[in-house]
Every structure is written in structure tokens, then in C-alpha cells.
Image (cartoon, rainbow, N blue to C red):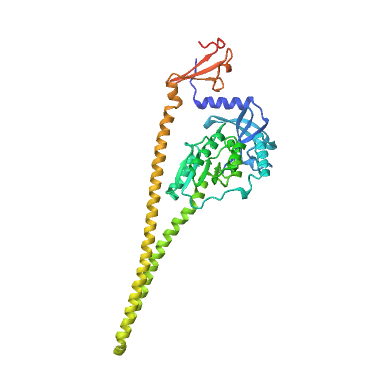
Amino acid sequence: MTYIQSVSDITKLIKSKLERDIPESLVRAEISECKFHVSGHVYLTLKDPGAVMPAVIWRTTASQLMTKPAVGMEVLVSGKLSVYAPHGRYQFIINSLQEAGRGALFLQYEELKKRLINEGLCDLDKKHSIPQYPMHVGLVTSETAAALQDILRVFRQEAPHVKLTLCPARVQGRGGAETVIEALRALKNIQPDCVIVARGGGSIEDLWEFNSEALARYVADYSIPLIAGIGHETDTTIIDLVADHRSSTPTNAAEFICAPWREVKLSLNQMDVALVNSMSRVIERQTLRLYNAQRYLSSRRISENLQSYRERIDFLQKRSVSVIQRRAENILAKKERIHNMWGRMQKAASHTYNLNRSKLGGIIGKLTAYSPENVLKKGYTLIKDRNGKLLRTVKSLQLDDHVNIRFHDGSRSAVITEDKGNNNE
């Protein structure tokens, strides 16, 4: 008889079997991700050339470690497998950790970094200065990246009048560096005032394309001032070292560009307030002087000096009016310039928004048309081996291999029973 079991029952069974049948182990691995949680726990991803494994160091153990874990570090860890039931996820509970050396990717990074520094590609005297008030900024990042939305949000709030031109690139995975180079090459034909290359945070593997030597050399020779906003604050890639300016995040890159414009807007507002206050004080002082003069003349009733005082009053009145008129004209002129500048800023921001919105609509249409589900509905299928790896060629199959065939409305399992060689039938 078949018993119906809950997900919790199955998870408990897996947890019990893993923890019972797999003893405490000593593992050598490279750390590819490392996050220090506010709770004091440390969450890691351990890897070797064939696999990755999630791991955790509980707070009490982490506080006693002699070696602080870091991305790229090769370590020897001891611990035991466990299952975190709420997520149905197995993880390796680390009881001790010691450094065994640096991982292969980290060593490649350090070797390239040293070579480029020795060649002078990172020297400050070879870097371009970033324009203080750029009116046109080129963006190189993924069209679907959160980093792009963060950058657009900052420009909308701080400098909506600045024109933004996006040249999309693939910022993760093999070949990403080549797409970044192509995007930068396209921007050279447009000639913006400066360029931001951006990508959000991730593991050392996620950011590896930005450690490309070809990309580093292209950026070092790039004729347009370039700002790199790659990863989180703790991430440093090769492109950060050769760029004209390095920002800790994509958001900080946008804020760096917008900061001078924010100061301009603040100065204009302060100037407007100061002019109004100055005009009010002048009027008050002149009014008081006239009032005091009138009181003096009426109280003394000196007939022989009356005409002289009247002339003095007329002179003060005319001078006051002249001063007020000049200051008022200056204020009106400056307000008119501010109004015109603000109108141009709003018009440019509206144009940029509508253009990017139109581009986004076209991109969404293309993505929808070429989505995997729509392609499958045309009669295509996806074939994966028992490990879930996508099979791209018949050479990947052997007799008796188990495969999974995915259609648009479901999946079926199959076994390879016959080899027809190169027969296309």
C-alpha cells in the first residue's frame, strides 16, 4: 500500500539519512561567495572545478575562527552535512576552517593585476578627468539589470536634464567582456561626455568577465572618460583599476556624476532666496530713513531749512527707487535664466524618458517573441541528461542513457535504445 507523505516528511527523511549515513568530513575547496550576516553567521559557497556546495558557519564557531574567510581563498574545512528544512536545501555545517592557499581564479586575478600595474596601465597620470557638468552620459550594462534601474532613478531625481544613451551588453557569463567592448566601441561613434560601465554585485565567477585582460586594455586606451561601477563596495575587478574613476556600486557611479548638478540646483535656490531677502531689507531701511526725516522736519518746524530737507528726501527716494529697480531687474533676469534652464532640463528629461520607454517596449516585445516557452510551442523540444544538463549534440548521447524531453506542455523521460550514426532520418 502506498502512503501519502507530506513535503515535511520527505525532508525529514532526507535530513535523517544524510546526517546518519555521511560522517563528518574534511573538505578542501575554494570560497566563491562569502556573506557575513548581521546575526553573526557566515554563509559561504564552496567550489571545486566540478561542483559547488552551500555552507554555513554558525555565529559561535565564526567568533572563534583564527582565519577570516574571503572570496578566492582556498580552505580546509571540517564539518557535517545537514538539511535546512524550510528551504529544502542541504548545506555543509563548518566546525573549523583554515586557509589552504588561494584559489585559481584569485591567483589569475592577482597575476594580471600585477602585470598591468607594472606596465603603467593603472597610473593616475594616464587617467582622464571626469567632466564636472556632463550633459550626455553613455551607459554600458544589461538592459534587464537592476543596476540600470538604480542609475536611471538617480538621474531622474538629481539631473533629469542629462541625456542618457544605453548601449546594452552582457555583463555575466562567457563572452560578456566582448559585448562590453562592442558597446564601448559603439559609444565612441556617439561621443558622450563620459561613460558608466555598471554591473551589480555577485560572486567572483559572476564578475569574472570584468577581469578580462582584453577588456582592461581597451578601457585603459579608451578616449572617453570612463567610470566603473561594478559589484558591491567590497568587490574590486581589473576594470576598476584601469578606469578613469572607480565607484563602489552602480548607484554611486550615477551619484558621482550628478553631484555637481545637485550643487548647482541648490546654489540657484539659495541665490533666489538671498535676492528676495536683500530687496526686502533695502526697502525697509529706506522707508525707515524717510519716516525719521519726516518726523524730524515736522517736530522742529524750521521753515528756512524745509526746502533743503525736502530736496534731501527726494534724493533719497530716487536713489532708493533706483537701487531697488536695479536689484529687481537683476533678480528678474536671473529668475528668467533659471526658468529657461529648468524648462530645458524638464524637456530633455521627458525626451529621454519617452525614448527609453519606447526602446524598452520594443525590447520586451522581442523578449516575449523569443522566450523559451514560445519557441517550444513552435514544435521545438529541450533534451537534458539525468543531471539536468542541456544536450546540444548527438555526440553527447550514448546507448542506454536516460534523458528528459521537455515540450511546451510538459516533460517525458526516455532511454536511448538505438544509435543510427550520422543518419539524419
The answer to whether residue 400 is visible is yes
Quarter of the image for residue 220 reads: top right
- Left or right of 31? Residue 308 is left
- Front one among 319 and 264: 319
Which residue is nearer to you in this view: 26 or 299?
Answer: 299
In this view, the residue in front, 92 or 128, is 128
Left or right, 335 with respect to 392, comes to left
Residue sitting at the far front = 189
- Horizontal and vertical percent position of residue 268: 42, 59
Rendered image quadrant of residue 232: top right
Residue shown at 40% from the left, 63% from the top: 273
Q: Residue furthest right?
A: 100
Residue 53 position, x and y percent, is 60, 31
State the residue at coordinates (38%, 48%): 347
Image height of 50 relative to 314, above or below: above
Q: Residue at x 55, y 27 (%)?
A: 12
Q: How many marks?
A: 0
Q: Is residue 162 left or right of residue 321?
A: right
